[in-house]
Amino acid sequence: MSNQTHCLLDKVIARYILSGLWKLNQNQPVTQTELFSLNLFYRASPQLHLLIVPATDNVLQQLSKLPQYTSLIQFFRQRSGIVQPARYCKRWSRRLRGYGFSREDANVLTLATFGLDEMRAVLGSNFVATYDQPMMNNWTKREDEIADHLAAMRRDLLEPYDQVSLPLVKRPEAILALI
């Protein structure tokens, strides 16, 4: 396993990064959320690896067919990977939906816990970068319950799944303050 820090970008953060890159390329001003997202993107290094969910990658594949976006998306994809669902993802997603998360939010949080990087060498992510305030609020409110549930579940899991941990769910600027 890797000692790299992994950060899973939700679709909104990925969109802010891409729109910020597009605006910079067009000499247009960027918004504050785009700027914070771009800071996370540019601070990615050998120590911080950015990941996206498969649904975001599917959208990027479609957009990359449009000539005006091809090089932008290639640049973004060179600096990010795609997280893949691993064993126990469906079960954990159902559990998270039971805590009041939407299907999409539960999927992101599940991939941050039980997702594998493209090389299948890293299980889970240290962070989820998001601006989804309802998801962050619910996560903060229920984190202890969720952690207890995961701890109980891990006792019955095979290696290396018995070692997973919960990610920190933060805004990009808060993640940058922690790394």
Image (tube, helix red, strand yellow):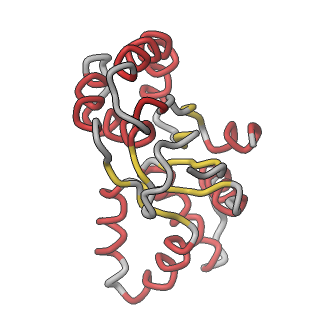
Q: What residue is shown at x 56% (from left), y 50% (from top)?
A: 1
**Between 26 and 171, which is closer to the camera in this rendering?**
171
Q: Position of residue 45 (x, y in %)?
A: 70, 62
Q: Position of residue 148 (x, y in %)?
A: 44, 11
Q: Position of residue 10 (x, y in %)?
A: 44, 47
Q: What residue is shown at x 46% (from left), y 45% (from top)?
A: 123
The residue positioned farthest toward the front in the image shown: 159
For this view, does 32 lie left or right of residue 89?
Answer: right
For this view, does 169 lie left or right of residue 87?
Answer: right
What number of labels is visible?
0
**Between 65 and 31, which is closer to the camera in this rendering?**
65
Assign the C terminus to one quadrant of the image: top right
Q: What residue is shown at x 65% (from left), y 52% (from top)?
A: 4
Q: Position of residue 124 (x, y in %)?
A: 47, 42
Q: Quadrant of residue 98 in the image?
A: top left
113 is higher (above) or lower (below) than 51: above
For this view, does 145 lie left or right of residue 24?
Answer: left
Q: What residue is shown at x 32% (from left), y 33% (from top)?
A: 106
